[in-house]
Image (tube, rainbow, N blue to C red):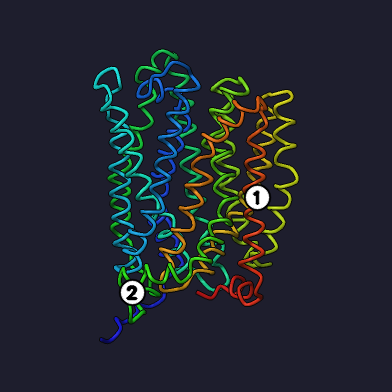
Amino acid sequence: MAARPIDPPSRPASKVAAVLRVTSGNFLEQFDFFLFGFYAADIGKTFFPASSEFASLMLTFAVFGAGFLMRPLGAVVLGAYIDTVGRRKGLIVTLALMASGTLLIACVPGYATIGLLAPLLVLIGRLLQGFSAGAELGGVSVYLAEISTPGNKGFYVSWQSASQQVSIVIAAALGFAVREALSAAEIDAWGWRIPFFVGCLTIPVIFFLRRTLQETDEFRARTHHPRTAEVLRSMVTNWRVVIAGMLMVAMTTTAFYLITVYTPTFGRSVLHLTSRDALIVTFFIGISNFVWLPIGGALSDRIGRKPILVATTIVTILTAYPMMAWLASAASFSRLLEVELVLSALYGLYNGAMVVGLTEVMPVQVRVVGFSLAYSLATALFGGLTPAISTWMIEVTRDKAAPGYWLTVAAICGLVATLILFRKSSVERRATSGVH
């Protein structure tokens, strides 16, 4: 069967529009994930009433983490689907599933109203979100890599993560507005749902943007699109690359959830700062991430992925716990902001080089499912569990800086994986050349 004719190369303006359309779904995903982390205490009181604040918080974070455990399944099922039918159709499906989960969490009545059905429905909502997110990041990253211009792949792909930071900034600003407008009792009772409803209002707009996406020229140019069985066989064959990729992602996903999703809870419950302070810090961290991510991607296009990945992981290993200990020794708004800004720079530079590097080490025919599976496994085992593990480590060790140990472990994983995956010079040449 003859290959479908390839359209002329896209103009710069259409490239920008394509980036905006494809990254719009990332906004909804991260917007809801951040809100779940920030309002964890309120969600716990509404859906998971328990004998102590610690128990309620742990139940909430356990449900939060359960969504991440669905990501590997979503990566395999939806990732294989995207590699088979195309990037555009697959990303519309992931958005539909994600929107369903968001609507569930926003609208479910509390435990006091419908009993055990309330936490069950919230759990189902989180599982749907996790299942869809399993392939969302991979699908978006691969789409951006395939539409990028030569020599700028890192810069293009970095906007997948950068788009998420916009949602963090808006969610933090919205949370701040709610805190200023309502009393603590009103927020506990119903006010915490307002930002979730606002997120639901963006769903029709994002659906419209996704429906106007064009399929990538690279995908349309292929004469053979593997069936699901072929994709799964390839994953078995390339399991070493997937596991190494998972370890490389461990650093970025742990750092991200530590400095964004967990920060509001850490600031209020552990450091005993005000909700206002925690939200302001998170707001600036979102802006900082947004700045550093494209810098990391563009820099990796110039000097290579490996130097950035190695340097940032080594610095993180050496400084993560000492910075957290310095913060915990005399907790304040300024210290929290300073520490998080440093971690934001390390995260942004690392992730800007890491995401595009991960698309490059995966076999072309199964690029989405390979990327998605590696990313989802890391998020399930490291990033998604970061709030729960951090809360547990602090409770057990009585050390407020304990999350620094967890980030150090993740950074060690990232360093080892980088040295394994980029040990061959051919990989590094491919990473810096912009070759698809």
Q: Residue at x 44, y 55 (%)?
A: 137
Q: Residue at x 60, y 73 (%)?
A: 427
Q: Tell me the SS state at disc 2.
A: loop
The mark nearer the N terminus, 2 or 1, is 2
Q: Where the N terminus falls, by quadrant?
A: bottom left
Could you say which is closer to the camera, residue 154 or residue 253?
A: 253
Q: Is residue 247 above or below residue 234?
A: above
Identify the amino acid type marked 2: Pro
Q: Is residue 248 above or below residue 218?
A: above
On residue 226, which mark appears?
Answer: 2
Q: Residue at x 72, y 56 (%)?
A: 311
Identify the amino acid type marked 1: Ala
Could you say which is closer to the camera, residue 259 or residue 166?
A: 259
What residue would you read off at disc 1?
411
Residue 101 point in image, percent of width and height: 31, 41
Residue 266 point in image, percent of width and height: 58, 28
Q: Is residue 103 above or below residue 220?
A: above
Q: In the visual, does 253 lie left or right of 59?
A: right
Q: Is residue 125 above or below residue 226?
A: above
